Structure formats: C-alpha cells, structure tokens
Image (cartoon, coloured by chain):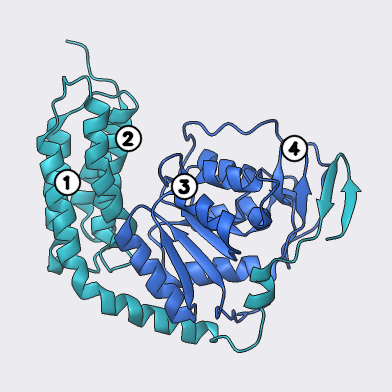
Chain colours: A cyan, B blue
Amino acid sequence: MAKNTADDANTFTVTTRFETLARRPGGLRREEALQAAQTAVEEIAPDFGNWADRELEQLIAAVRCIDPKSPDLKVLVEAVAVHARRVRDVGTTMGYELLTFVADKLCEILEAVEAGAEYRQNLVDCHLEALLLSRQERYRNMKPDQVPELSAGLVEMGKMIASPPIAK
Amino acid sequence: MANPTINFRDLVIVVADPNSYFCMVIHGMLRSFGANKVIEIRDGLGVLQILNNQKVDVVLCDARLPPYGGLKLAHAIRNNRNNENRTVPILVLTSDTRSSTVKTARDVGANMVLTKPTSPASLYDRLAWIAFNPRKFVDTETYFGPDRRFKIEGYPGGVGRRKGDKAAVEIGDAEGPALSQGDIDSLFSNARTGQE
C-alpha cells in the first residue's frame, strides 16, 4: 500500500482481492455470461407470477388496514410500501416493465404520504387496479408508453398528491 | 478496454437486500457469470458480522437495507479502521435515483450505484468497471473511500484542486430529479473535470 499526500488528503493505492481475482484469465466472455444470466432469469420467470400474486395480495391486505386518521398512519403506509417496492424492484427484470412502472408510481404516492401529504384512498385504489391489470400475462413485455392513457393517468395522480389539497 | 472478461470463480460476493426474491434473481445472475461463493444477507447487521469474520471481495447492498439503510452501512464499513474489509468494493443498489441519493452514496464511499430493477448487463458492466478501473483511496478527516476525482479511459482529463471533500456527510431526505443509470455513471466519473 503506497501512501502519499495530495493536497490535504492522504491518497494511496489499494489493489483489492476483487480486482486481482476478477482479472484472472478463465472467466466467461461477457456475451456468454450475459446469455447464461438471461437463461437463468428465464428459468426463474415461471415462478414470478405466483410470487407477484402473493405480494399483491399482501399489499392489498395492507391497504385495507389503513386508517387515514390513525396516529400510526406512517407505519401502516410503510407496510404497504414494502410490498410495492418488492414488486417494483424485480418486475422489469422478469419482463413486467409496466408492473414496475405502476408499482413505482404507487411508491411515489406512499412516500409522499410518509413525508406528510394527505392520504387519498381513491388514488391508492386506482393504483391497485392498475397493478392487478399490469400483472396480467397479456401486459407482459409491455412498456408504459404502449398504454399511454394509463401511464399518463398515474403520472397525473402523482402530481395531485404532490400538490397540497384545496382548502374547503 | 472493450468488453473485459471477469473471472468470478472464488470471489466472495455478499448480496444484501431485504427482498428475498430480488436476492435470488441477483444470485442467479452471479452464478451464471461463474460466481460460486455468493452470500445472501437480509440486513446490515448481518453484513457487518460477515465482514468481521471473513474476507469479502465485493458487497452489493440495497440503499434501504434495514435497519439503518445501505448508505449508513457503507459509511460504517469505510469508517471501521480495524477491519480488513474497509476497502472492499461497495455497490449500492437502489430504485431511488434522485441526485441527492446518488451523491450521498458517492460521499459515503460507495464505488458505484446500480439502479433497480437490474439487468444482467448492467450488473456485469458495473462490476467490470470496478475491476478494471481501479481508483486510489482517499483518507481525510471527513472522508474515507475511493477517490471521487477519478479518470476513466477516454474521458477528457483535468484535475481540480481537492477542496470538495465535504464536511461530515448527512444522510437525509432525497432531493432532486431522478437520474438514469447513464447519469449515475457520469456522476461517479465526472468529478475529475470539476463537475458535480
């Protein structure tokens, strides 16, 4: 580890074991590695539907537990957000880009509520319906821009929750 | 370097994410790349325990990893002076790509941020980037981690003075627009030209 001074900082060279081992000859070529990984993802894919259905069931159950007047609203909302994030984080990888998009929009709304925005059941319900729709097999491999009305509607809803409610 | 080949055999790779399905997908990708020593962990305390007990070659951790988040975990790893894994490459996985989050990841010493959902290509290429673009480490009163002013091949040079080492990093609420993976890569690679 060679140490020297640059400006007011100590800088030094570290050759990590990761660099050393990763550079050894004998690894798969990038194209081969990616092809193998894609095959692995496709082997997992048939199970994704069951997993996503279970997550969505739990998500909907968690939504039903939300009482907007509860002092524990943030905790209740976070219980929903956990499932929304899980679905969002793997949807596209498994071929459900639209599902990831919808889950992402729901996450934005839930995060806004956790940050203090008003909880609006009707907006959440719309996202639940969109989630169930985008989970269907016929929406697999679809991108948000292939269902522009749905996508634009969810984007608009996100803007609504970002705006303060109109005082009555 | 065009299309470098990584040898994953015997690399000890920690994948830390509370989502078991996500872990399984990433684990599957890494095994397909040739990795044979992948450890799945669900929380940050488990990561610290592993790092205290054995040599780890790379850590992939979720930015929201419970209980304190992956960014605080990265900060803790970099600031543990007594651990041999202090300089381990850290790849932060997140779907929160707001600029403030990405910059904070950089400022706590993460080597790279990888967006979720993750494709095999994006995972492979970021690991290749870490392996084949080694960076010096910097040790200041307020920062320990990979040099944030580094040069990538083909990028115009020009080094600014090191005045940007920020005071203690606050990991607060994320702000700013969402960034694409390309934006994030640029953020990690542009600092040498004086861009934030």
Residue A78, position as x, y percentages in the image: 27, 36
Please state if A154 lies on the left or on the right of B2 as rendered.
left
- The image shows residue B14 at horizontal and vertical percentages of 49, 62
Q: Are marks 4 and 2 on the same chain?
A: no
- The quarter holding residue A125 reads top left
Q: Which residue is mark 1?
A: A59
Q: Amino acid at mark 1?
A: Leu
Q: Read off the residue under disc 4.
A: B164
Residue placed at 16% from the left, 19% from the top? A69
What is the chain identity of the residue bearing mark 4?
B
Looking at this view, name the residue that lies furthest to the bottom.
A26
Q: Quick one: B88 or B2, which is closer to the camera?
A: B88
Q: Cα distance, mark 3 to mark 2?
A: 25 Å
Image quarter of the C terminus of chain B: top right
Q: Nearer the viewer, mark 1 or mark 2?
A: 1
Circle 1 SS class: helix
Which secondary structure lies at badge 3?
helix
